[in-house]
Image: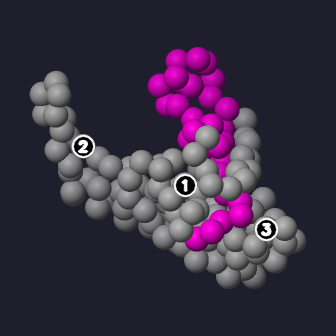
Amino acid sequence: MYKNILLAYDGSKSGQKALLDCRDLAQWSQAALTLIAVTPLYMDLIGVEGGVYDRSLAEAEKEKYKNILDEGLSQLAAAGHQATGEVLLGETVDEIAKYASKMSADLIVVGHRHLDGWAARWWRGSVSKSLIEHAPCSVLVVITH
């Protein structure tokens, strides 16, 4: 069935549920499990049409995501799973899809929380919905409310 499972992990409530589901699925299928956390690019706006990459903010966020990733890896280790992990920098959907291709993932697992109101859904967008369109393999969306 699944031999290489990739979990896009952000430490959120839906991410925690995805971690639990992914752990069970990996155990059942005896799959290799990899966690990634994606740090977005941070830009300081300059005028109407430009921006500058903010390295200090990006480094602080990378450290935050590394701690989140380490916490997820610790949970898996405590449950008896060996997993690897990596923090990536870039646009979330693109980085997840590229990493899944690179590791020949059979399944991507991602958490999703239903947002209240159309404005919240429009403003935030949906990583899981976009990922389904760009993923090189199957995607399991773990939903919380």
**Quarter that holds the N terminus:** bottom right
Residue type of the residue flagged with mark 2: Met
Q: Secondary structure at mark 2?
A: strand
Residues at marks 3 and 1, CA–CA distance in whole angstroms: 17 Å
Residue drawn at x 79%, y 68% is 2
Percent position of residue 51, x then y: 18, 38
Q: Tell which of 16 and 99 is nearer to you.
A: 99
Q: What residue did someone put label 3 on?
A: 2
> Compared with residue 133, is residue 83 higher up or lower down, i.e. above or below?
below
Q: Which range is magenta?
A: 103-132
First of labels 3, 1 by sequence position: 3
Q: Which is more foreground, mark 2 or mark 3?
A: 3
- In percent of width and height, residue 67 lies at 47, 67
Q: Which residue is mark 1?
A: 97
Picture quarter with the C terminus: top right
Residue 36 at x, y percent in the picture: 54, 64
Which residue is found at the position 16% from the left and 44% from the top? 52
Q: How is the image coloured?
A: one colour
Q: Earlier in the sequence, mark 1 or mark 2?
A: 2
Using the numbered discs, state the Cα–Cα distance from disc 1 to disc 2 in whole angstroms: 23 Å
Q: Dividing the picture into quarters, in which one does residue 116 lie?
A: top right
Residue at horizontal 87%, vertical 71%? 28
Reply yes or no: does residue 113 show up in magenta. Answer: yes
Give the residue at mark 2.
Answer: 43
- Front residue of 112 and 51: 51
